[in-house]
Image (tube, rainbow, N blue to C red):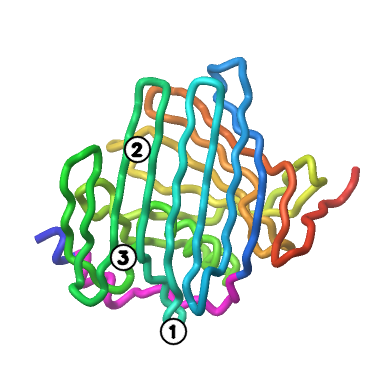
Amino acid sequence: MRRALLFALTLFSLPAFSTELEPFSASYTADWKQLPVSGSAERTLEKVDGERWKLDFEASMLVAGLTEQSTFKLDNGTLLPLSYRFDRSGLGKSKKVEQDFDWQQKQVIGSDRDNAVRLPLNRGLLDKSSYQIALQLDVADGKQSMSYQVVDGDEIETYDFRVLGEEVVRTRAGLIDAVKVERVRDPTQSSRKTILWFAKDWGYLLVRLHQVETDGKEYQIMLQEGTVNGKQVEGRKD
């Protein structure tokens, strides 16, 4: 019943983006507060062919690493995921996820930690990577609160966000004016916290992410350098 209700609501609230999607490439420093060693992360978005896009994220540290990839297309302003892959190793938390979005058969088929996943598929449903692009475009469109239906494990979860305001982020590329966004969670259900910053003058590229896990561990990525639509990201100097 809950899933049926979520899909019914989704059909009436499909995201339609007015901001044009631009390819980007960005490198970040990646830090776990509890570890003395810093790592690195790379995030790229490229247009593969026609209306198909590919989003890649890769992070590595001395003791851990992860890769994440999503392919999707834009159809009349609606983002339609095509495939999702996730692979994490190290820190005793290995995990592998594979999802394929079959729009002809209207179903999501895949696996999560070797457990089979099969879910009904409707327009508006996103994977755990492509929703980040939807969020980026919605922030660019000036929305103050956003909600997405996301395939999370073998279930469909609602991801809610709200804009907290604007803030200047100090990066290696300079000072960047950014929009600060918070993942909204029920504090009685989860103590996890996620804050994201999107660059106003650079296609709303993600420039910083800070996350606090339920066990208190903190993780952050911060922009080192990047390009948006082939143009080098340059912030203001002090």
**Is disc 3 surrounded by few (<14), some (14 to 19) or many (20+) residues within 10 Å?**
many
Question: Which comes sooner in the sequence, label 2 or label 3?
Answer: 3
Q: CA distance from mark 2 to mark 3?
A: 25 Å
Q: Nearer the viewer, residue 207 or 62?
A: 62
**Is disc 1 surrounded by few (<14), some (14 to 19) or many (20+) residues within 10 Å?**
few
Residue at figure coordinates x 20%, y 39% from the top left = 114
Q: Is residue 16 magenta?
A: yes
> Which amino acid type is shown beneath numbered disc 2?
Pro
Discs 2, 3 touching: Cβ within 8 Å? no
* Residue marked by disc 3: 125
Q: Nearer the viewer, mark 2 or mark 3?
A: 3
* Residue marked by disc 2: 187
In-image side of 91 versus 189 (left or right): right
Percent x, y for residue 148?
36, 61
In-image side of 236 versus 24 (left or right): right
Tell which residue pokes out farthest to the left in this image.
1
> Looking at the magenta stretch, what is its main secondary structure?
loop
Range drawn in magenta: 6-21
Q: Secondary structure at mark 2?
A: loop
Residue at figure coordinates x 57%, y 42% from the top left = 209
Question: Which comes sooner in the sequence, label 2 or label 1?
Answer: 1
